[in-house]
Amino acid sequence: MKIAEFLRTISEFLRKIMAEFESDIIRAHIVVSIYLFTADGKLVVLKRSPKDLGQYLFEVPGGGFDKEKDRDLIDAVRRELLEETGLVDDITIFDRLGPFEKQPIMQRFLFFFQRPAVRLVFRFAGLINRKSEEVKKMIVISDDHEDFAVVGLTAGKQDGISFSDLPPEKQSIAHSAYAVVFGSHPMH
């Protein structure tokens, strides 16, 4: 094959890919997360693995909706809780926390191409009907995480982190979730 033929073949391939790209410009990825509190009002947080994107960040359990496994968003929350923490029993999941959040992202496909996509994040509040010391003994973290903590929403370090180590937007959502679960804010 001559270089000119090779370049034409590559050009045709790229044109086909770009046609698909333009006809399917936005793809939505549904993501769920849960602000899970213990019976004594502490929040379960996970520390990302150093080998993952977002390494060393603390986050709440959550992940992508799997259309093969999940019938609805609550199924996705329960599956993600099980996968990331091993927790499954005595958990109540409350209503969603407000409307979903749209996060624009670039999705990689075919190794080096990227296309615009959007991540739709649905957040939930939850309660595990056990005290924090018992929950700590039950948690089995996934390979995506290197550690976990069960922290109160007030100042001071607990389990090596403080609530203020969470990103500000997660702190705000955690306060809203606490009010949904317990009916009031921990500072009142």
Image (cartoon, rainbow, N blue to C red):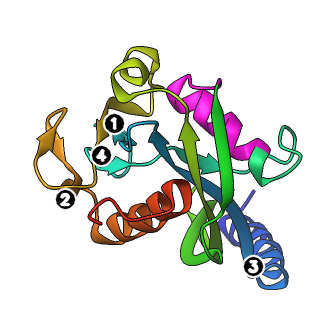
* The magenta stretch spans residue 169: no
- What residue is pinned by disc 1? 51
- x and y, in percent, of residue 5 in the image: 76, 68
- What residue is pinned by disc 4? 55
Residue type of the residue flagged with mark 1: Lys
Q: Earlier in the sequence, mark 3 or mark 4?
A: 3
Q: Please say if 78 is above or below 115.
A: above
Q: In the drawing, does residue 64 fall left or right of residue 12?
A: left
How far is mark 4 from mark 2, CA to CA? Answer: 17 Å
- What residue is pinned by disc 3? 18
**Which quarter of the rendering shows the C terminus?**
bottom left
Number of numbered callouts drawn: 4
Task: Choose between 149 and 57: the one closer to the eye.
Answer: 149
Q: Earlier in the sequence, mark 1 or mark 2?
A: 1
Examine the residues drawn in magenta and state their main secondary structure: helix
How far is mark 3 from mark 2, CA to CA? Answer: 44 Å
Residue type of the residue flagged with mark 4: Gln
How far is mark 4 from mark 1, CA to CA? Answer: 7 Å
